[in-house]
Image (cartoon, grey):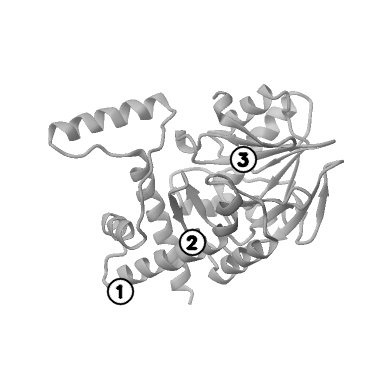
Amino acid sequence: MGAQNIAEINESTFLIDFELFGIRRAGAVYFLKAGKSCLIDSGTRTEAKNIVKALDSMGSFPPDIIILTHSHFDHAQGTPVLCREAEKRNKKITVMASEKAVTNLKDQSWNRVFNNKHKFENIANVESIKDGQTIDLAGLELKIMDFSGHCADDIAIYNERKKTIFVGDSVGYKVEKELIFPPFMPPFWNPDGFKSAANALKRLECERICLAHFGCLRGAEARNFPDDTIKAYETWWHVFAEADRGGKLDDVKYLKETLIKEADLVIPDLELTKPSMIMMLGIINRFRKIFGKKPIKVAEVQLETIIGWLTKGYRTYTAGT
């Protein structure tokens, strides 16, 4: 965890790459500082230690407030870790989330849809916030906006003065400026909410859109993103629907190859940071070379995992309609 994991967006706002799943540029949280400090999202339980290290390097741990954009595990499960570390230092963090998220945070077991072997820690004592509310950081005001769709309790956090918005996963993902994929994750997907959030984002004409996966979009890239993400959703959903009709919805390899063709996907290079994962991938690729096979890219493996999750999101939604 080094300086390359922290990027200044403006004088009061910083991106922290917490190396989600041991991969660089896969997951971001955002740190804002005025008279009070605020961390937007808390990462996973495993990688929360990276956030502590980053904030310590800035002389800024603990933050006064954590605002959770939604209750999915990779955004919320770091919260208990950060709060316990603050308590060790005789300090307390105020945790805030949408009024819709409080119940989902109290019982995090539904996140087992992503990993049924993992034990997810429940998160209590969360202060509820609602659409239209303003959070005052004593010199920096943040407006809360209901962006529910990707999850039942998504919010966006808007710094109107800087025309910068933090959207979590609510309007999709963009990896290495090459790969846009949609957020129809289980178990709460609502396409109308997603489209409403994307259109609201378009009306705001933000100069910066800060994504959890991954990074801060600026200029034309930010202006085009609302249209780009809706187009990506429509393309991907069509591929999943066609695969469902053809009995191939469980065939991840088929979905991946079809998406590469239909959505014109470019698989980017991603960098592993965990030594154990680097070693394992190296061993696998040495064997693949022996047998005349192409090496596996980190992004390709992660894409297959994401496609598996999106399949669950697709199934959850279509089963209820």
Q: Secondary structure at mark 1?
A: helix
Nearer the observer, 65 or 92 = 65
The residue drawn where x is 46% and y is 51% is: 114
Amino acid type of the residue tagged 3 in the rendering: Val
Q: Which residue is mark 1?
A: 245
Label 1: how many Cα within 10 Å (few below 14, some 14–19, many 20+): few
Badge 1 or badge 2: first in the primary sequence: 2
Q: Is residue 283 left or right of residue 220?
A: left
Q: Residue furthest right?
A: 138
Residue 257: x percent and y percent? 28, 56
Q: Which residue is mark 2?
A: 184
- Image height check: is 248 above or below 167? below
Label 2: how many Cα within 10 Å (few below 14, some 14–19, many 20+): many
Amino acid type of the residue tagged 1 in the rendering: Arg
Which circle marks residue 29 in the picture?
A: 3
Measure the C-alpha gap from mark 1 to mark 2.
18 Å
Badge 3 or badge 1: first in the primary sequence: 3
